[in-house]
Image: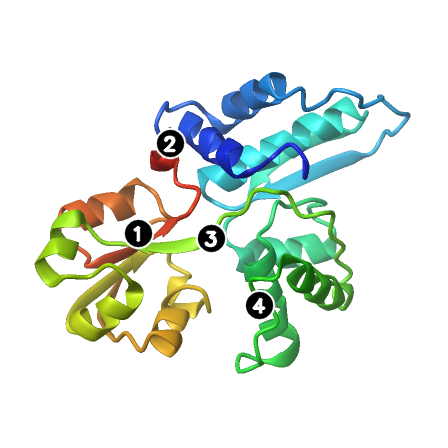
């Protein structure tokens, strides 16, 4: 998985669900076949059942299906289940109610950092993947969690406005947005957990000093957020750097 899934392939996988409207199991199966994902895997004598958890958005669900395919090829009885947000599935992982979850190194690092050291703990995640994963493994060991090698693919939080909005206010960066668009009339859109996340509303407020008049709970970089942008319901919305719209 770590070797097979790079940035362009992740975008292509997202295109299969978000633009071509295939289900995550179908998109994952087609990806696995096209990329020989199970090539070289020898079916062992493993008889255990493995439940792969997923967050409630298609990228997580598709990657969970890929893990199911690989684990099944290795001889396990694997299945998937959409759990919800990290606050729900991380405790389930600790308790052994689920055995595997596809995750994001930096955001999980800060989630566990806050859990272990408090909400005001100094950040341990950074743009250095190796250092971030090392910090993640150290934090995870406190909760009985272990981690594989990070994939070549990465998916970062990004924040979008419409082209019309950008032209009207002359914004190209978050710093531009902070200087020109902060205030009570500014509405941020994203998933329900965004106000509590250091890489979402908290980060925008603390790092860029952006103030929001309102937060609108929509989805995780999906059609509701994009519709909110184009309809003018929100000023700025959380999207992802692996968005299907970036597929060539």
Residue 218's tag is: 1
Mark 1 or 3, closer to the camera: 3
Cβ–Cβ under 8 Å for marks 3 and 4: no
Pointer 3 residue: 156
Q: Secondary structure at mark 3?
A: loop
- Residue in the foreground of this view, choosing between 137 and 225: 137
What residue does disc 4 label? Answer: 110
**How far apart are the alpha carbons under marks 1 and 4?**
23 Å
Name the disc covering residue 63, or none: none
Query: Up-down: is 104 above or below 45?
Result: below
Indicate the position of residue 210 as horizontal and vertical percent values.
Answer: 28, 74
Considering the image in quadrants, where does the N terminus appear?
A: top right
Badge 1 density bin: few <14, some 14–19, many ≥20, Cα 10 Å: many
Residue shown at the point (68%, 24%) measured from the top left: 37
Label 3 crowd bin: few (<14), some (14–19), many (20+), radius 10 Å: some
Q: Which one is earlier in the sequence, the residue at label 1 or at label 2?
A: 2
Looking at the image, tell me whether mark 1 or mark 3 is earlier in sequence order.
3
Closer to viewer: mark 1 or mark 4: 4
Label located before the other in sequence (1 or 4): 4
Please tell me whether mark 1 or mark 2 is closer to you in this view: 2
Q: Secondary structure at mark 4?
A: helix
- Residue located at (74% from left, 51% from top): 96
Which labelled disc corresponds to residue 18? 2
Q: Counting other residues with Cα less than 10 Å from the Cα at mark 2, is it few (<14), some (14-19), or many (20 or more)?
A: some
Task: Find residue 78 and report its image quarter.
Answer: top right
């Amino acid at each position: 998985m770590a070797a097979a899934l790079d940035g362009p392939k992740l975008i292509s996988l997202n295109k299969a669900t978000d633009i071509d409207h295939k289900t995550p199991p179908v998109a994952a199966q087609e990806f696995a076949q096209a990329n020989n994902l199970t090539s070289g895997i020898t079916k062992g004598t493993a008889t255990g059942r493995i439940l792969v958890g997923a967050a409630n958005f298609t990228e997580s669900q598709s990657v969970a299906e890929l893990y199911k395919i690989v684990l099944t090829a290795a001889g396990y009885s694997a299945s998937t289940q959409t759990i919800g947000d990290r606050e729900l599935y991380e405790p389930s992982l600790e308790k052994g109610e689920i055995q595997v979850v596809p995750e994001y190194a930096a955001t999980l690092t800060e989630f566990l950092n806050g859990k272990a050291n408090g909400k005001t703990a100094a950040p341990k995640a950074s743009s250095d993947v190796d250092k971030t994963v090392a910090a993640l493994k150290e934090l995870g060991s406190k909760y009985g969690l272990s981690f594989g090698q990070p994939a070549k693919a990465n998916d970062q939080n990004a924040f979008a406005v419409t082209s019309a909005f950008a032209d009207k206010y002359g914004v190209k960066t978050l710093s531009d947005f902070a200087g020109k668009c902060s205030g009570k009339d500014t509405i941020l859109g994203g998933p329900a957990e965004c106000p509590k996340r250091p890489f979402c509303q908290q980060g925008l407020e603390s790092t860029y000093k952006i103030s929001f008049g309102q937060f609108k709970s929509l989805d995780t970089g999906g059609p509701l957020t994009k519709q909110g942008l184009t309809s003018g319901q929100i000023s700025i919305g959380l999207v992802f750097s692996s968005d299907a719209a970036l597929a060539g």
